Image: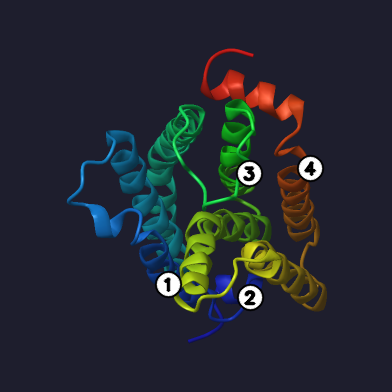
Amino acid sequence: MKNSLVDRILFPGTAWALLLLVPITFLGFYPSYFGRLNIPTPTVVHVHSIFMMLWLAMAIVQPILLKYHKLTYHRLVGKISYGIMPMVIASGYFILRHSYQRALSGEEVGPPGYYAADLPLHSKAAEFVTIGCVYWLWLMVYYVLGISFRKNLAAHATFMLAAALTILGPAGDRLVGHLCDAMDWPFNAIAGNFVFGLVFVVFASLFALHVKRKLILWPTLLVLVLHLTGIFFYYNMAYHPLWERCASLLFYGYL
C-alpha cells in the first residue's frame, strides 16, 4: 500500500499507536470508575464517560480511515463529531462543576496530606479543578482548530492528534499514579509531569518531522505554544486569587 495521508503528515504507525489510548483509559479509570460500576455514581459521571468513550472511538478510527484512504467515511465520522463534541464539552463542564463542589463541601479529594489542613475550601476547590480545566480547554481549542482547518490536511491532522492526546491527561496521570502506588514509589515531580513531558516530546518530534518533510510548521508550533501555556497556567494560577474568583464564578455561581 502506498503511503497514506496520515503517514505522510504524522508519524508512521500513528493510526495504530492511538489504539493504546484504549487500555490507558481503561486502566487509568478502572479503580475510580470502571471497577466501581456496581456502586451508585452521579449521573453526570456516567453521561460524561459515555460521550468521552464515543469521542475516543472516533479519534482512534479517523486516522485509520485516512490510512486506508476511506475519505468518505472519514468525513462522515467527522460530521458525526459535530454532535458528539458539544456533549463532551458540556458534560466536561458539569464534571468540573461537580468536582469543584465536592472539594468545596469539605470532601477529601486528594491524597492524605496533599492539602494543608488550614487551606480555605474555596482555594482547595479551585486548585482541585485546575488540571481538569487545562485539559478541557485544550480539547475545545484543538478540536475547533482541527475543524476550522479541515481543508488543510497538515493542520487538520496535527490539531486532531493534539485533541486526541488530551485523554492522556486524566487517564495517563491516573495510570502513572496507580503504578507508583503499586510499586510503592512516591508520586514525585517526574511522575506528576510525565504526561506533560510526553506530549511535548511528541509534538517537538512532529515539528522536526515537518521540517524534514517541508510541511507547514505553524500548526505544530501553535500546539507547542498552547501546550506550554497550559502548563504555565497550571503551575502559576492554581492558588492565584484571580483563578479562585474565576473558578467560583464558573462552578459555583458567585465571586
Mark 3, residue position = 134
Classify mark 3: residues with Cα within 10 Å, few (<14), some (14-19) or many (20+): some
Q: Name which residue lies at 63% across and 28% down.
A: 120
Outermost residue on the front side: it is 117
Q: Name which residue lies at 42% across and 72% down.
A: 19
Q: Left or right of 235: which side holds 65?
A: left
Mark 1, residue position = 19
Q: CA distance from mark 1 to mark 2?
A: 19 Å
Given this view, does label 3 or label 2 mark the residue nearer the observer? 3
Given this view, does label 4 or label 1 mark the residue nearer the observer? 4
Quadrant in the rendering for residue 117: top right
Q: Nearer the viewer, residue 32 or 154?
A: 32
* Disc 1 secondary structure class: helix
* Disc 4 secondary structure class: helix
Q: Which mark is residue 8?
A: 2
Q: Amino acid at mark 4?
A: Asn
Counting residues from the start of the chain, the first of labels 3 and 2 encountered is: 2
Counting residues from the start of the chain, the first of labels 4 and 2 encountered is: 2
Given this view, does label 1 or label 2 mark the residue nearer the observer? 1
